[in-house]
Image: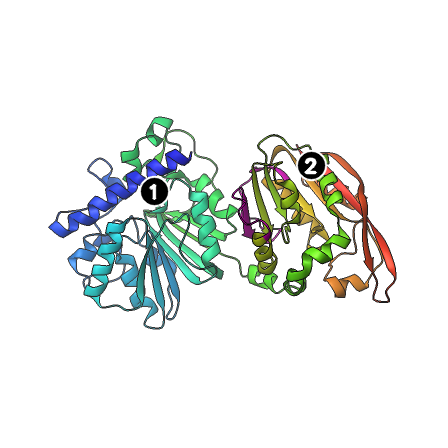
Amino acid sequence: MANDSLEIHEAVRDRYGRLALAIQTQESVSCCDAVTSTCCADSIDLYASDTRWLPETVSGLSLGCGDPLALSRLQPGQTVLDLGSGGGIDCFMAARMVGPDGLVIGVDMTPEMIDRANENKNKVGLNNVSFRLGQIESLPVESESVDVIISNCVINLSPDKTAVFREAFRVLKPGGKLAVSDMVTIGQFSAAERADLSAWSECVSGAEDVAAYVTAVRAAGFTEISVREKGRPDTELSMIGDGAGPARLFSAQITAVKPESLREDLFSASNVYFAEVAEEWDTLRSGFFTEEMRDAAIARAQLPLHAVVADIGTGTGFVLQGLLGRAETLVGFDSSPEMLARARLNLDGQDQVTMRLAQGTTLPADDGSFDAVFANMYLHHAPDPAAAIREMARILKPGGKLVITDLDRHDQEWMRAAMADQWLGFERDDVRGWYLDAGLGEIDIDCAEGTCDCSTPSAEAIALGIFVAIARKQ
């Protein structure tokens, strides 16, 4: 797949590099050829806003399929990111909308397009625009720094749309908006059509079925997702099922929102606590949960070869460290930036490990994407344990295993304030019920290989029971 992705990127870069050079010789350029011209309109006809102020070197490099600016509802002072900014037309119009106190960033992977965009920037005289060379699957943009993301007929060109939306979610501020015009389908392209790199680079065979597109957007963590055909804007398509039969290609208007609740979660009692103890957590944790207990729980999971494994509430990466050498791909999810920073240090150089900032009830991962999911001492920090278990089950492959280790029910009320625990452990029958409700079977709940040893505020040593709950997705 890596070679396929490289070939696609090279084909797209070559085509758009030639288009960028063609505008210098005043040749007519378009993202579509005569065969596929249904994907695009005349460049100026796309926009509701006045474009007459733009020079021909800008309007002549309009390679879009819609008007994301009409969807974005930009406000003065906002920071806007354009995915696949090309010659800069959407960036320049956005720059006028956000005004001198705003900022517009254009990212494009084609050096020739970056050159044209910077030349055009000098022509239009706008100082609140910058262009960066980079891929939209790995954005050269800081996390949570953007108010609105726009894109015009570009995401369909990517060989890894899941990565595109994951990156978009990362760089958006909580409450930020995604506003995209893109080519999608109802129905499927054949394998032969997918393999046609020329058609892919012309905004055709890389287009995804609407249902798959929405799944990728939702998996990244977005909510309030809307998909409407540009020619039929009154019909909502975000809830339709997989398309059957040959692909029908059309331009769509797509919007989505990064939830505000992520920011609220960042300042929850649990995250405030973990922000304070992140530097010393590895030492503190050693008294609560030992490496021997961790390794015993991992061994019970009986992971398959080449397993893809998620760790929910990964903290400083303790469970991920135990999984090194036992799984091919590891992803740690946590809502604490400080804990994730420590995890990245602890697992520096381990290329098979990825960290993602996320809430346990809205994981940025596809349905059925993991062979196993672990959650070690996370559940008693979750506001809704049942919902967290349902979300973990969602991302499991059929036959995949969920492994939760957590505290048995106890009466140490002081732990709510001292450690921001939301629950004083759990009754095992409750956990079993939540597993069943989430569609899990073959449930086995037993004692862990040790206890949680800690001291009360009065210096009394106590040992709290820990359970291991393992189940398989049916």
Q: Residue at x 59, y 60 (%)?
A: 338
Which circle, 2 or 1, is nearer the viewer?
1
Q: Is residue 100 above or below residue 330?
A: below
Lower position in the chain sequence, tag 2 or tag 1: 1
Q: Is residue 420 above or below residue 334?
A: below
Q: CA distance from mark 2 to mark 1?
A: 38 Å
Q: Residue at x 67, y 39 (%)?
A: 402
Q: Which residues are magenta?
A: 346-373
Outermost residue on the bottom side: it is 101
The amino acid pointed to by label 2 is Leu
Q: Could you say whether the residue bearing mark 1 is in a helix, strand or loop?
A: helix
Q: Is residue 369 magenta?
A: yes
**Local crowd size for mark 2, using a 10 Å CA cut-off: few (<14), some (14–19), many (≥20):** many
Q: Residue at x 29, y 41 (%)?
A: 12
Quadrant occupied by the C terminus:
top right
Q: Is residue 176 magenta?
A: no
Instruction: Return the x and y of residue 54 as percentages of the image width and height.
Output: 19, 62
Residue located beneath label 1 in the image: 157
Choose between 37 and 309: the one closer to the eye.
Answer: 309
Q: Is residue 451 left or right of residue 183?
A: right
Residue located beneath label 2 in the image: 440
Q: Is residue 12 left or right of residue 380?
A: left
Name the image quarter holding residue 36: top left
- The answer to whether residue 312 is visible is yes
Instruction: Return the x and y of residue 295 as percentages of the image width and height.
Output: 72, 40
Instruction: Return the x and y of residue 452 as percentages of the image width and height.
Output: 80, 52
Q: Residue at x 19, y 64 (%)?
A: 123
